Amino acid sequence: MSGRERVLGRVRRALADVRGEDGPVERAYLREHGRRSAAETVALLAENLADYRAVVHRCAQAELPTLIGRLLTERAAGSVLVPPGLDQSWLAGSDIVRVADRTGSTPHELDRVDSVVTGCAVAVAETGTIVLDGSPDQGRRRITLVPDHHICVVRVPGQVVSCVPQALERLDPARPLTWISGPSATSDIELDRVEGVHGPRTLEVVLVD
């Protein structure tokens, strides 16, 4: 008998006299802290993103290509990784070399890419969190973890929710979910912060009205 089987056997014996639930689990916890308008919710998202050291930009839809082009130029990016379902008009303001999201791309190839541009699945205002779910405009998880610069476009207010429970209602748990709260960072025992350890060193979030 394996260790796994022994542990599961003990769990089954401990639960042998526990009756099953007669109905759905009650979820009476607080779902949202205060009531906010859509504009206030977006403002809270921007505030919390900035608190996590993400760089936040706001623009109208028509201004998006110009803004992304400027951000890539300021970054001196020579290449940008593009998910297969990304709206190509978003990059109309830039003539930088575009790299496709390919299954065969190696980590070394991805590491040579300067920037990546994606959409998102949902953004959570109260936590300043952006969630990617591998949809065509976001690509596979690794393309947002290896390149050093990530530009993420969030459509507001449609893709913004107040709290995590509201975000979970929109997400498919079977999809590869990546939860991002600011640029990748870690701290050692002396609390010295180091960015770019587990993902992009720079996260720029564009809130598109």
Image: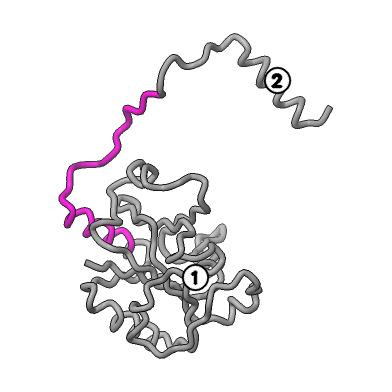
Write the residue at 30% across / 80% down. Answer: 65
Where, by quadrant of the figure, is residue 183 drawn?
bottom left
Residue 194 in view here = no
Question: Which mark sits nearer the N-terminus, 2 or 1?
Answer: 2
Write the residue at 66% across / 18% down. Answer: 12
* Image disc number at residue 200: 1
User: What amino acid is at disc 1?
Assistant: Pro
User: What amino acid is at disc 2?
Assistant: Arg
* Image disc number at residue 10: 2
Q: How many numbered discs sit on the rendered protein?
A: 2
Write the residue at 40% across / 90% down. Answer: 95
Write the residue at 35% across / 41% down. Answer: 165
Q: Is residue 148 left or right of residue 119?
A: right
**Above or below, 21 relative to 148:** above
Dot 1 lies on which element?
loop
x, y (%) of residue 64? 28, 77
Q: Is residue 35 left or right of residue 91?
A: left
The crowd level at tag 1 (other Cα within 10 Å; few <14, some 14-19, many 20+) is many
x, y (%) of residue 41? 22, 53
Colour convention: one colour
Residue 73 in view here = yes
**Above or below, 114 relative to 59:** below
Dot 2 lies on which element?
helix
Q: What stretch is highlighted in magenta?
A: 25-49
x, y (%) of residue 20? 51, 15
Where, by quadrant of the figure, is residue 46 drawn?
bottom left
The crowd level at tag 2 (other Cα within 10 Å; few <14, some 14-19, many 20+) is few
- Image quarter in which the N terminus is found: top right
* Residue 26: in magenta span: yes
Circles 2, 1 touching at the beta carbon (< 8 Å): no
Residue with the most extreme top position: 17
Q: For the residues marked 2 and 1, what is the alpha-carbon distance in whole angstroms?
A: 43 Å
